Image: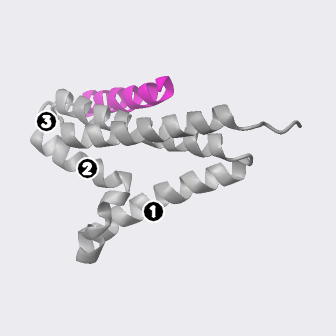
Amino acid sequence: AAACALLCLAIWLGACAGLALIGEKDAELGTLLIVAGHLYVTCLCIVGLSMATSGMSNRRSVSIGICFFYVFYSFVLNVLEAFWPAAERIGFTGFMHFYKPLPIARDAAWQWGNLGILMSAGLIIWVIGWLRFAQRDLPGA
């Protein structure tokens, strides 16, 4: 969670530094902070998935593969939703359906429903992984 916060803070500070370097005065730094906050919750959802897969698997490659596949699936589904109406029916299965930076920046408002879904999903998946990890027998090296 701290690494996600540091990443999002670095992204926001980088945007602030870039705006200062080019002399842009019209950008709303508060709106960029809202986008960074949404990114933080999205990162927590992905971290929950990675914690769950590592708690359920004995092999690191399997955990990495599952996480990579889901992130890739979410990105592809997000792109397909824009061009293919049939993809909208299953769009909710990807986390990117609930993280849309452009509407967040346009409205300059927190999207509490999407934040709640991402936080709940991340927490539930993390708890499931934690419970599974607590029950399993770790093989010796």
**Mark 3 touching mark 1, by CB under 8 A?**
no
Helix, strand, or loop for circle 2? loop
Q: Does the magenta stretch include residue 82?
A: no
Residue with the mark numbered 3:
109
Label 3 to label 2, Cα distance in Å?
12 Å
Question: From what the image shows, is residue 98 above or below residue 89?
Answer: above
CA neighbours of label 3 inside 10 A, class few (<14), some (14 to 19), many (20+): few
Distance, label 1 to label 2, CA atoms, is: 16 Å
Which residue does the numbered mark 2 point to in the structure image?
100
Tell us which disc is closer to us: 1 or 2. Answer: 1
In magenta, the rendered stretch is 1-22
The mark that comes first in sequence, 1 or 2, is 1
Which of these two is toward me, 19 or 117? 117
Q: Residues within 10 Å of mark 2 (few under 14, many from 20)?
A: some
Report which residue position mark 1 lands on: 73
Q: Is residue 63 left or right of residue 98?
A: right
- The residue type indicated by label 1 comes to Tyr
